[in-house]
Image (cartoon, grey):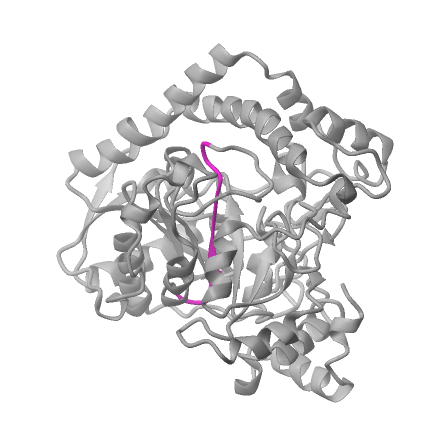
Amino acid sequence: MSSSATGHTTKAISAVLLAATALGAMPAHAQESVSSYLARIKASDKAGPKINAVIALNPDAAKAEAAAKGVTGPLAGKVILVKDNIETADPLPTTAGSLLLKDNRTGRDAPFMLGLRAAGVVVLGKTNLSEWANMRSGQSSSGWSAVGGQTRNPHALDRSPCGSSSGSGAAIAAGMAWAAIGSETDGSITCPASLNGIVGFKPTVGMISRTHVVPISHSQDTVGPMTTSVQDAALMLNAMAGSDPADAATTEADAHKTDFAAGLAAASLKGVRLGVLRGGVGSNPKVIALFEKALADLKAAGAVLVDLDYTPPAEMGRDEYTVLLYELRTDLAAYLQSVPASSFKDTPPARTLADAIAFNKAHPEELKWFGQDSFEEAEAMTDTAVYTKARANSLRLAGADGIDKLLADNRVSFLIAPTAPPAWAIDLVTGDHSIDVGMGSLAAIAGYPHLTVPMGAVEGLPMGLSIMGAKWDDKRVLEAGAAYERARTVPVPKPSLKRWGE
């Protein structure tokens, strides 16, 4: 974190904000200014509870805020944080959490950032993440990176923030910015949003450009907003969506772009048929009870609930993993080859996944807590025929024979389920471990929109409600989420900034 960027605060302001943080509240004056957010970060991210969500601060944020005063519109002057696998033109590196990219200052904006800047958004800094977006090892701890360390969940400091957009989720829950940008391949926006008690939206793959975003998979990667309300997520999407000639997946984006925020305040669930994915609820009685309350609220709002007996076939996840391994090797190499040699100040330029593997072996601090088994599997996954078959099969099972068929056969508009389980204990030694809840992989593999909205908590640990829809049905999914948000009767927890149970 830049020491100069934190010089805007005083001990008195920090003390006031820290006291407010402990109460789960944010002073009215602190909600829209760079200096107040910096004070919040100083008080609760790097001191006090030490959430450790912010990996770097933008020294030009105050200048950007001053420039935004000349912009009109709903996003003018809004302060955001950006996940640190997304390039911005600010004087900040884009590291993906890896020491390999600690000097990766390309000076480039990801194309969707141009829309946000034109709307007057102010980039405050970058957020920590699960290193390499949680694709280095199957034994990792979500929210840990060699550059940023371990991010903590502000609702329970010893519990996981999930990942890979861990810092984005934790920062917004703790009031460190108005909104954040995350990225997802499978669950990396929706899971941290759920566990941190905020809204997260994974749009249709191809709605937003992925150019200059450190990749895993061109088939499944997307970026998306993480906010405190569905309305705010829609406003962000308005500025982020659009076609990019450098990203073939976005060819149809302009045709499907609309005012995603228009009409959300009046959106209704009356008569809307919702497919309830009972197979994604799990067996925990407290999780079941919370989900039943959400269903009761949906029914009271006029929705028609249709129970669905569906279990994802095991081969869908198996083939997805094959796809991710193959595309990681090829897509990461393409990204690294676009990075200027100056971004590797202390090491020879890395241009391939093999180079990243070799770097990790030469730097024991990278492999302190877990290895790089997934990287090594990806390096060995070179059979194009196997990959092509796996992609076709996983896409069919999640899309045509998955979400599409469930929607059509049951005459439902959306699929719903709990998003993810309550937060599990952070364990750097043995990695993540949690109960089986949620069915978001369907939307991730198919590339369809997936919104998570807070639905309450289990023992003080937040959980979200997933709403998934058909391809390019992003606006209607947001409308359903906004209607549920208004209908929800269960209290949404405020961060305790304490260890669980204290």
Residue 425 position, x and y percent, is 64, 50
Residue 262 position, x and y percent, is 27, 66
Residue 225 among those drawn in magenta: yes
User: From where the camera sits, is residue 246 visible?
Assistant: yes
316, above or below 106, in the image: above
Nearer the observer, 337 or 44: 337
Residue located 56% across and 76% down the image: 67
Residue 246 position, x and y percent, is 48, 39
221, above or below 86, in the image: above
Residue located 68% across and 39% down the image: 339
Residue 46 vs residue 133: left or right? right
456, above or below 129, in the image: below
Nearer the observer, 314 or 288: 314
- Magenta residues span 219-229
Residue 262 among those drawn in magenta: no
Screen quadrant of the N terminus:
bottom right
